[in-house]
Amino acid sequence: MMNLEELKKTPQVSESDNFCLEIVSPGLLDTLTFKSASRQKPGLGEVEIEVGATGLNFKEVLIALGVLPVPPNTSVKFGLECAGKIVAKGEGVSELEIGDEVIAFAPSCFSAFTTVSASSVAPKPNGMSLEEAATIPIAFMTAYYALIELGRLGQNEKVLIHAAAGGVGMAAVQIAQMIGADIFATAGNAEKRDFLRSLGIEKIMDSRSLSFADELMKFTGGRGVDVVLNSLAGEFIPKSLSILAPFGRFLEIGKRDIYENSQLNLQLFEKGISFFVINLGTESPNFNSMLREVVKNFQDGNLTPLPLKIFPIPEVATAFEYMARAKHIGKIVVSLQDKEEVRGLIASSSTRKHPKPVDFGLVQRDLQNKKLLSSDHNLGLLPTEGIEVFDRILGSGLPQVLVSTQDLLSRLEQSSMSTFLSSLEETEHKYLPKQVHPRPQLSNAYVAPRNELERQIAQRWEKLLGIEHVGIYDDFFDLGGDSLLAVQLIAALKENIQMELSVNNLLDHPTIAGFLESIALTSASEKPPTALPSYLVKIQAGNNNKQPFFLAHPIGGQVYFYRDLVSCMESERPVYGFQSLDLDEKDEKTELLTNVEKMAAEYIKAMRFIQQNGPYFIGGASFGGMIAFEMAQQLHAEGEKVAVLAMIDTPGPGEMGLKLENETAIATYIIESLLELDKNFISLNSMPEQGNAEEQVIYALEQAKIANLVPNDFQIQTTRNIIRIFKANMEAMWNYRPRIYPGKIIFFRAQDRREKYDPEHPEYSWMDLAASGIEIYPVGGNHITMNYDPHVQVIAEKIKLYLEQNN
């Protein structure tokens, strides 16, 4: 029983004091939202903590991205660990007092207050801030439980710590150093490996290459290590098991292969090795005593807090985005010192009105209302104008037409301004504030919004993009927008506009003026086209019993490149290819697409002529793999499933190879690529010497057609702008900045690398971007020849297997 003095110290619980962090739409990090929450009075054996700092964990990021599923009708309240101060306690709590600063494993730690069992709480070590203390609970407890409790790591034993620059990895390094173990480590990039060397670790390997095993066995004279702390997936698990010494212990932190029920070769266990799955929780045996032992080691100076990057609580969405990029070292911590700003956001949102959503069909019917039109009776049409309008009406084929002497957008503004603007305000509280930057230097001049509707839309863009003064002709992508931000903007508008909108509305019309005009025209009448777009090519008809496989064009814009691949696949599988949108464009003044996001959006629109909904099978070689990756991003952001994403030797950021800067370089590349397939198909002496680069390419393609290197029906006359398309796609490839993809990548890597053109490890670019992992398959041949017989058979067989498994 608590005495009277303790009862006096216990504050009265206030319903309005607390808040929690939830996500409205998993996959859209900007929909992380603070909501009012009740404080829970501590019961028997419980304490209530006022949270001062919260450690962010990758599991939470995966949930927010929609990668880890959440049971239906379950509300996720983020935050798994914290540091703070006890403000109330229940009966039966004797070792903790009100006012004590503590660390804890607790639920909903992105809240102002959380209530938890006292057994999950320990006093905060002296001499450190709450933010530093928040790096301790999960990272150090996981490492301690794995290495000490289960792994029984001893002095002078050899331990391999995978991904040692992460939170758990760095905690494990400190614990291993404290014990006096011999440490081997892996990390994913040079910066992280250099950091580990600064900690005194000498034997460091690449966590992205299976060659770590050979290096380690050389370090140990063929004996191996006593303990492996593993967080890597796929082939890294059997490789890591293979380098264990007799009676070694394998400590598995990752869960992906467990969830996927991956199989292990039991022969690896012949040496008497042990396999432990690390699944630490507050219900684990001796949890509280382990927690207090960890804290004691901090008090004794044996352990120190992890390096950390701190985000204030109003910038929590930015913290999630930062961790999603997987570039940090140590721990990401969110400080809750500024709770009042969050409470202010919640309070302001709760006082707003909630108007009825705008129905654009109703808006247009309102425009025909006599009362509205009577105010404009003095605005008429001349007889000649009337005849012209009448001719246009008869030719339109529309069942109903509104004739107006004023701009339609102005009328939209007049009839629905108050409703539409208030509906925009309704969802403002869902989007957390971003740092504001000046408007970047653009090719177009700034044009201010001309009316209140455009002004409010511009403010939404400014808020979402973090940019001052967005003009009505500023391109969304030139301002730094991407497919995920586009989805967030569309999602906000769809909640309030009763008409079907997709990301394509913004991708097709990426300026405020164009976007609003497209909405008005769409709501008036949208007659769906019946013919397939010219850039969607049926490569193989197949039958309706198989789901189609879609392939995006490589950098040259053509899909004939996939001829051998498709011929090696089952004939029943429908296969479609997206050739360059601009392939048939003969006007050299026409501006070509140089934006991967726009290409992907257009190809998704075309794909839905064939397949309305997922799961989708998509892929591409080289630049085509990059387009397929972005298509998968956009589809996932729209809630669609991508069952197979195949990328064939696709380069990416940091692994791009040679950039071809001019027409001569591009022509040389095309001709050399054809020579890779048949070194005798052309005599270089017969090449037109006086012709320009484009004429040389066309001559080479004509000879390639004779040599059957390209199909007989390949229309050479349509490729006179092939150099321009190549240059445009090259620019798009180099400008693309991919973000983390929640799904899985199937990657095919050419074993032979062309020193002049190819990066050594194109797969490295995508490892950090595939949240569900990447399966890498080596294929004979080089970047070009791997796509032709006999090498392409390996690719075809693997793709067939994945398609059948997901059909």
Image (cartoon, rainbow, N blue to C red):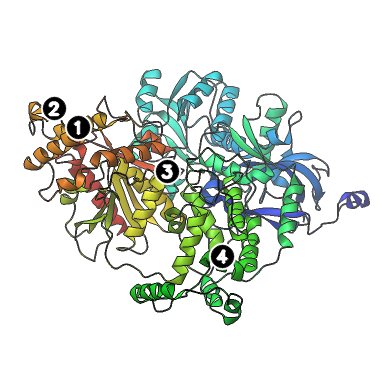
Q: Position of residue 68 (x, y in %)?
A: 49, 52
| Gap in angstroms between the C-alphas marked 4 and 3 | 46 Å
Mark 4 surroundings within 10 Å by alpha-carbon count, few (fewer than 14), some (14 through 19), many (20 or more) = some
Outermost residue, right side: 4
**What residue sits right under mark 2 in the picture?**
689
| Gap in angstroms between the C-alphas marked 4 and 2 | 59 Å
**What residue sits right under mark 4 in the picture?**
410
SS type, badge 1: loop
Mark 2 surroundings within 10 Å by alpha-carbon count, few (fewer than 14), some (14 through 19), many (20 or more) = few
Q: Is residue 301 left or right of residue 540?
A: right
Q: Position of residue 106 (x, y in %)?
A: 67, 48
Mark in the foreground, 4 or 3: 4
**What residue sits right under mark 3 in the picture?**
770
Mark in the foreground, 4 or 2: 4
Mark in the foreground, 3 or 2: 2
| Gap in angstroms between the C-alphas marked 3 and 2 | 47 Å
Decide which of tag 4 and tag 1 comes sooner along the chain.
Answer: 4
Q: Name the residue type under label 2.
A: Glu
For the residues bearing labels 4 and 3, Cβ distance under 8 angstroms: no
Looking at this view, is 434 or 392 the one in front? 392
Mark 1 surroundings within 10 Å by alpha-carbon count, few (fewer than 14), some (14 through 19), many (20 or more) = few
